[in-house]
């Protein structure tokens, strides 16, 4: 709950009610090619942290946080226009669905029925298909300290069964946490895996690559992939591999070593199996940028996290590896991998998932 407090403001002697709740501002961002108006909502907390979210793709366009000297910097890669987001293929800052990461061969079988999906990444379906949740208009509603975005994905959209009603609530609190609460319901058995695809550069957008960022991931195992980046099904120990981030490691320290898995991802582009104690919120990853002192912690209820070192960013206006993604998720290709935690959602059930990006200038 927002805590209101009375303050006297300077020489004017004006007494007013301020609140520690995040403020919210709405401004037009532009129009889609189809002529739909896109809004940009900016949430600001009492510490001056500011996140701007567009209704197109539910996209985090910018996220300004202080460094160790209090200097604000935009730590999320973003674009200036709706048009540039419509043409963008890197999922910059966007909400991802119905299915985050890959479904092998663009198909899966559920209740004995085979569902064929559009293949947009070699033989695979990546991030929900060519018109995934990153490329749709979300309906926005202001809520206390945040923004609620809803989207109704019709039965058969991008090949997936069931009318899926999706809600994502972004909230910003005074502990410098940006929280994402995802929920979904369906009217037919389906699969769902939702995430956000923000690319972080804690030195600030445009301030070089992320190879000097120091990363820890709470994972003893990861899911190695085949040549098409589809998990083989194995949960491989990170021990003795360049995927061991159980202690803090610079991202660039081992990224160029001879390693079949690194070669398959053109760098890091892998799902880590989080060490979990239960089903609640747990710390999954921590990133420190030594120069600025900015720290990002990722907490989640999800069983996995995709660490992607921005290897294909050169296809955008951003240089290769100038941002990194930590996409909380269920494991890639789960609909075809019976041994992975299930991503099936049935009528009457509510899918729920929560992730927090927490910032501190403490390193
Ligand atoms: C995910 C995938 C990557 C890549 C990026 C976007 O992280 O695993 O292979 O597609 O999205 O370019």
Image (cartoon, rainbow, N blue to C red):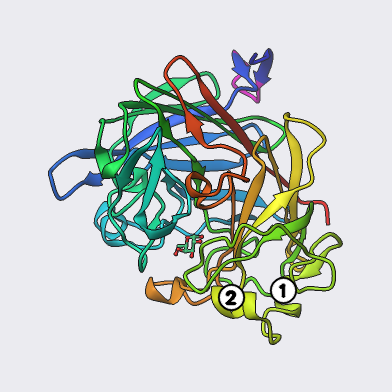
Q: Looking at the rendering, which quadrant does residue 352 occupy?
A: top right
At numbered mark 1, what does the secondary structure look like: helix, strand or loop? loop
Report the front residue among 10 and 31: 31
Report the front residue among 20 and 164: 164
Relative to residue 33, is residue 172 drawn left or right?
right
Q: Where are the magenta residues, as a range? A: 9-16
What residue sits right under mark 2 in the picture? 208
> Is 175 situated above or below 99?
above
Q: Position of residue 302 (x, y in %)?
A: 64, 39
The local crowd at label 1, few if under 14, some if 14 to 19, many if 20 or more residues have their Cα within 10 Å, is: some
Magenta includes 14? yes
Residue farthest to the right? 247
Ligand 1 within 8 Å of the CB at mark 1 = no
Q: Residue 267 — which label?
A: none
User: Gap between marks 1 and 2, in whole Å?
Assistant: 10 Å
Residue farthest to the left? 34
Residue farthest to the front? 112
Task: Work out whether residue 359 can be spotted.
Answer: yes
Q: Looking at the rendering, which quadrant does residue 5 occupy?
A: top right
Q: Nearer the viewer, mark 1 or mark 2?
A: 1
**Disc 1 + disc 2, Cβ < 8 Å:** yes
At numbered mark 2, what does the secondary structure look like: helix, strand or loop? loop
Q: Quadrant of the N terminus?
A: top right
């Amino acid at each position: 709950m927002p805590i209101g407090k009375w303050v006297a403001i300077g020489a004017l002697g004006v007494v007013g009610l301020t609140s520690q709740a995040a403020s919210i501002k709405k401004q037009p961002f532009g129009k889609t090619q189809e002529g739909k108006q896109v809004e940009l909502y900016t949430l600001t907390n009492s510490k001056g942290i500011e996140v701007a979210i567009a209704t197109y793709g539910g996209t985090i366009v910018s996220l300004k946080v202080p460094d160790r000297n209090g200097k604000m910097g935009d730590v999320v890669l973003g674009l200036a226009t709706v048009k540039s987001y419509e043409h963008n293929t890197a999922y910059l800052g966007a909400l991802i669905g119905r299915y985050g990461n890959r479904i092998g061969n663009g198909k899966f079988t559920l209740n004995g029925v085979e569902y064929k999906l559009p293949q947009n990444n070699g033989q695979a379906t990546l991030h929900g298909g060519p018109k995934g949740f990153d490329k749709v208009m979300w309906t926005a509603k202001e809520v206390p300290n945040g923004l609620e975005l809803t989207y109704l994905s019709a039965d058969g959209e991008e090949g997936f069964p069931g009318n899926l009603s999706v809600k994502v609530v972004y909230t910003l609190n005074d502990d410098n946490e940006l929280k994402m609460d995802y929920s979904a319901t369906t009217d037919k058995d389906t699969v769902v895996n939702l995430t956000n695809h923000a690319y972080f550069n804690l030195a600030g957008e445009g301030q070089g690559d992320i190879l000097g960022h120091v990363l820890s991931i709470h994972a003893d195992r990861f899911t190695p992939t085949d040549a098409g980046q589809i998990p083989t099904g194995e949960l491989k120990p990170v021990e003795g591999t360049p995927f061991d981030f159980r202690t803090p490691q610079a991202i660039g320290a081992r990224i160029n070593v001879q390693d079949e898995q690194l070669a398959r991802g053109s760098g890091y582009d892998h799902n880590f199996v989080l060490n979990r104690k239960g089903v609640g919120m747990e710390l999954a990853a921590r990133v420190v940028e030594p120069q600025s002192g900015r720290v990002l912690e990722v907490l989640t209820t999800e069983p996995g996290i995709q660490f992607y070192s921005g290897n294909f960013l050169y296809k955008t206006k951003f240089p290769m590896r100038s941002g990194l993604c930590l996409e909380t998720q269920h494991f890639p290709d789960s609909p075809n991998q019976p041994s992975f935690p299930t991503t099936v959602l049935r009528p009457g059930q509510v899918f729920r998932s929560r992730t927090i990006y927490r910032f501190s200038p403490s390193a």
